[in-house]
Amino acid sequence: MDKIVINGGTRLKGQVKISGAKNAALPIMAATLLASGNFEIHNVPDLRDVKTMAHLLRIIGAQVDFANNSLRIDTCKCNFYEAPYELVKTMRASIYVLAPLLARFLEAKVSLPGGCALGSRPVDLHLKGLEKLGAKIHLKKGYIFASAKRLTGASISFAISSVGATGNILMAAVLAQGRTVIENASYEPEITALAEFLVKMGANIEGIGTGRLTIRGVDHLNPVEYTVIPDRIETGTYLMAAAITGGEVELTDTDPKIVTSLVSKLRDCDVLIEEADSKIYCKAPNQIKPVGITTAPYPGFPTDLQAQWMTLMCVANGSSIITDTIFVDRFTHVAELRRLGAEIKRDKSSAVVAGTDNLNGAPVMSTDLRAGASLVLAGLKAQGRTDVLRVYHIDRGYEKIEEKLKLLGADIWREEGEL
């Protein structure tokens, strides 16, 4: 099994191209099931999760071809309404096929996702929302069985803002009869991208980019061509890689508007950030000023950048407090960062980080996608050799991470590992 090896201490410098957003591509891929025909989706990252979703679509009956970061999806022969456990257990985003299958075929069988390294993330909001639209839901032997004679519009108010539930209810409502209103909807850029994709297919959606979505159901949707938005988490990760290493990096093919909360915090750290339409220039200061963060739903600080921010604070000139209000147990990277010499104290849903100049390379293990990225960033700064094991976590969300970092001057490579 692969591992990433880093000889740290190199200042990153140069230009890096940002890939398409995984968290936008996956629900958009699922949404192709809402119509029969040929779709073309561009700027799709070459990732494990994308390949898993493509495999799931093929099981359902779609023809899927992927080349040069573009997908061609033919949904004409879809006739199998199940997402099996073997796939859903490897990628929670498989739950996104639930609503499209139900909306188009009026039945679906999808495995319950279960827990993961970030703790339990139940799908209650998804199921309650679908029931309000007229679906009958049964849970049996670890599967969700959903059926309906006809989905009808309803008023749905989420107790908490949920990205996944918003995406699923949105996809169900576009083919439901009548008007649906979703209150306290998530409006992460990836949900906005999904809504814009659905509108391009012929859906009637108002309030895109806000917490209140109004959907008027239509009788049918059409296949379209679409380009996926840039990945804001990859954007943020490379900005912090530049800052951590004292580097000077320009990011291309991105969008500054989707990382405003991070950019604000980086500027508080005295990092120089300059923005253009699709570029961000980042230059690190001589010393990183310590700045605490608290994660929050968009447009707040993303939980998916919390681990990387902690790594940045490990080399800051002073102490900071990091609090995660989204996933309160999302701190598995703390123990691994300590192996590199980081000074971190955990306190419930927070961590107190004392900056240090003494990060040193060691073997460390990825426990989830973003934790893995944080360890790669730490390895870039640490003196000596760092081996990051269980790279398959990182490959779920970062396209060719070692190749991109190598282009920026990092001494980094991939080799076969023990785990």
Image (cartoon, rainbow, N blue to C red):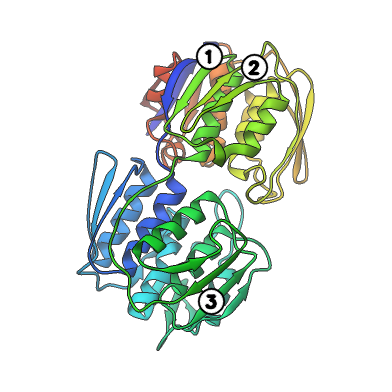
Sequence order check: which comes first, mark 1 or mark 3?
1
Q: Amino acid at mark 2?
A: Leu
| Cα distance in 3D space between marks 1 and 3 | 53 Å
What is the spatial separation of the Cα atoms under label 3 and label 2, in whole angstroms?
53 Å
Label 3's element? Answer: strand
Q: Is residue 178 above or below residue 158?
A: below
Q: Hey, which quadrant is residue 102 in on the image?
A: bottom left
Which of marks 1 and 2 precedes in the sequence?
Answer: 1
Residue 399 location, quadrant: top left
Q: Nearer the viewer, mark 3 or mark 2?
A: 3
Q: Amino acid at mark 1?
A: Gly
Q: Amino acid at mark 3?
A: Thr
Residue identifier under label 2 = 359
The residue under the point 56% across, 63% down is 207
Q: Which residue is mark 1?
A: 8
Q: Nearer the viewer, residue 46 or 140?
A: 46
Which quarter of the figure is the N terminus placed in? top left
Query: Is residue 130 among the parts visible in the rendering?
Result: yes
Q: Residue at position x 48%, y 33% from top?
A: 277
Q: Is residue 264 left or right of residue 395?
A: right
The numbered disc on residue 180 is: 3
Q: Position of residue 378 (x, y in %)?
A: 58, 23
C-beta proximity under 8 Å, tags 2 and 1: yes
